[in-house]
Image (spheres, helix red, strand yellow):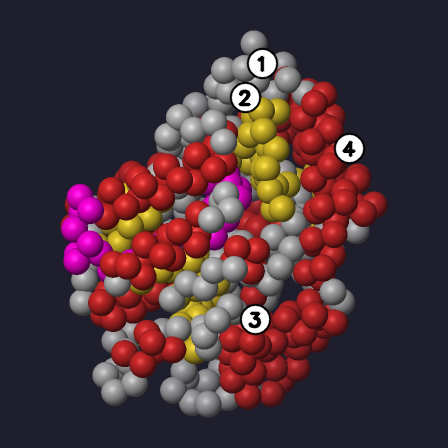
Amino acid sequence: MGVGDGRAVKAADRAHVFHSWSAQGLIDPLPIAGAEGAYFWDYDGNRYLDFSSQLVNTNIGHQHPKVVAAIQEQAAKLCTIAPGFAVDVRSEAARLVAERTPGDLDKIFFTNGGAEAVENAVRMARLHTGRAKVLSAYRSYHGATATAINLTGDPRRWPSDTASAGVVHFWGPFLYRSAFHAETEEQECERALAHLEQTIAFEGPQSIAAIILETVPGTAGIMVPPAGYLAGVREICDRFGIVFILDEVMAGFGRTGTWFAADHFGVTPDLLTFAKGVNSGYVPLGGVAISAEIAATFDQRPYPGGLTYSGHPLACASAVATMNAMAEERIVENAAEIGERVIGPALHEIAERHPSVGEVRGMGVFWALDLVKNKETREPLVPYNASGAAGAPMAEFAAACKRGGLWPFVNMNRTHVVPACTITEAEAKEGLAALDEALSAADAHTV
Ligand code: PLP
């Protein structure tokens, strides 16, 4: 097979690759020839501006030369070593993560990705408290392994639901589609906290090990929590001896314009999960940052969890190089600045022009457009459903983006504007112009 031949790549894919979340007979994967910075391209000369950062993970863009070099150097030095050894890149990656996480989250357990981080955080919380139940939000995504998919609120959970998982869902704050009939952010915050307290009372506080929340829910719609909500959850957790887990797999490492989204809210969880942006996914890596108190639970008692590739040297080398490059090149600052000065204002302007844009929300390079049939009724452009972006209006909108050279992130009735944290003003404007044009395809479905 010629590696330069897109048709051969696709033929082998269709013959042998079993794809995630897909009906295998209905997909048509685009063969990719290469990528650099904010762009990737196919074998037919079509180049796409990546407004999705793949799965919201390439925070430093594609093929960052310092990270590529670090992986190459590490490969020449030591490709793999078991997790039980102390090794320079693993120690340094853990130190750099711990230096950035809030409060006393100073011990790092490495995993291969986000779902494993969530699995292990929940295991730690259950062992630390001796309790079983975990509370999570309906509007959430926490990963696709057994516990993580049960914690997930979105419909991808339904086929994998098990009654015995000990998971209870609740409503987080989301004023635009308030579950509490609230009219202001203050009301939404107050009522969401009261609802959480009541859920805890009815589940039995003594049976609840943890509450897990995405600091800013990502896949579920980028709902920045109102001021005081996360501090309120922290206080409730403290009152009932419940472990507070913040899932920063998507929101962490620059995405919201700070190293961690928790930095915006001045809240320190007991456990913080991360993955994606820690090394932009150049080599699979995730982890749990652990508080001193929970880490001490396992000082004399063995932690009953592990992975062959925990703290893999190639992954850790890429994480060290990524965090250093992000600091040297002020990549987190760029995300904050471009978000506030360019992307946010442009999206609000776009919303005024397009009848299909119901709400714009976000921060940094983490924005959502909530697409609606009608701005008054706020009826979603496609209904909440089990197949994500299914539905002609969203498919037509995505196709229009691609025709305009833009690769969008689409989930249900939303498109998310989630480019790399390295995006330049010119690139952001190019993408926003393409988005503006493509939204006419969504406007055509408004009533
Ligand atoms: N948690 C959050 C908040 C996520 O966004 C994701 C993935 O999108 C995960 C966990 C799961 O991560 P992974 O796909 O690396 O297992």
Mark closer to the chain start, 4 or 1: 4
Q: Which residue is mark 4?
A: 433
User: Residue 105 lies in what quarter of the image?
Assistant: bottom left
Q: Secondary structure at mark 2?
A: loop
User: Residue 372 lies in what quarter of the image?
Assistant: top right
Does the magenta segment cover residue 215? yes
Q: Which residue is mark 1?
A: 446
Q: Which circle marks residue 372 in the picture?
A: 2
Q: Which residue is mark 3?
A: 100
Mark closer to the chain start, 2 or 1: 2
How far apart are the alpha carbons under marks 2 and 1? 7 Å
Q: Residues within 10 Å of mark 4 (few under 14, many from 20)?
A: some
Q: Amino acid at mark 2?
A: Val
In percent of width and height, residue 87 lies at 50, 88
Q: Amino acid at mark 4?
A: Ala
Q: What residue is at 43 percent from the left and 35 percent from the top?
A: 188
Q: Residues within 10 Å of mark 3 (few under 14, many from 20)?
A: some
How far apart are the alpha carbons under marks 4 and 2? 20 Å
